[in-house]
Image (cartoon, rainbow, N blue to C red):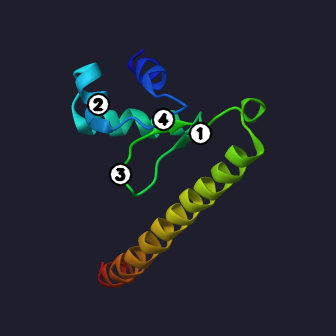
Amino acid sequence: MMKETIYNLIPNDRYITRNELVDLTGLKDREIRKYISEIRLEHTIISLSSGKGYRKARFTDKMTKEEIAQEIIIMKKAINENNSRIKNIKKVMRSQIAYLKILEREA
């Protein structure tokens, strides 16, 4: 229920910040982030490291060619940011896996 409420609060024509979602729902920031993560498994939610907030993907039938071109730029940037996060997580995991192997040898 709350996940649906939060999804419905996220616009597709502008960004909404987590602070705004906290104010509108009364939930804590951590709870908002958890629900956003769950929503992202079912819907395209756009957010960039710029910190503007979140917004839903727009319907292309209601966009001009220029808006579509701008949306392509935004989506490429979002995908690149996600790929960068993945690379950083993999780097961290290397040392964790190495440590696990040491532990397993000693067990």
Q: Earlier in the sequence, mark 2 or mark 1?
A: 2
Q: Is residue 94 left or right of residue 27?
A: right
Q: Residue at x 50, y 67 (%)?
A: 86
Mark 2, secondary structure of its residue: helix
Residue contact at pointers 2 and 1, CB within 8 angstroms:
no
Foreground of the two, 17 or 3: 17
Mark 3 residue crowding within 10 angstroms, few (<14) / some (14–19) / many (20+): few
- Tell me the CA gap for discs 2 and 1: 19 Å
Mark 4, secondary structure of its residue: loop
Q: Which mark is residue 14?
A: 4
The amino acid at mark 1 is: Thr
Please provide percent x and percent y for residue 61: 78, 31
Q: Disc 3 marks which residue? A: 51
Q: Earlier in the sequence, mark 3 or mark 2?
A: 2
Q: Earlier in the sequence, mark 4 or mark 1?
A: 4
Foreground of the two, 103 or 44: 44
Q: Disc 2 marks which residue? A: 20
Please provide percent x and percent y for residue 79: 58, 60
Q: Disc 1 marks which residue? A: 44
Please provide percent x and percent y for residue 99: 32, 81
Q: Residue at x 64, y 34 (%)?
A: 58
Mark 3, secondary structure of its residue: loop
| Residue sticking out furthest to the top | 1
Q: Earlier in the sequence, mark 3 or mark 4?
A: 4
The amino acid at mark 3 is: Gly
| Residue mark closest to the camera, 2 vs 1 | 2
Q: Is residue 54 left or right of residue 74?
A: left
Residue contact at pointers 3 and 4, CB within 8 angstroms:
no
Mark 1, secondary structure of its residue: loop
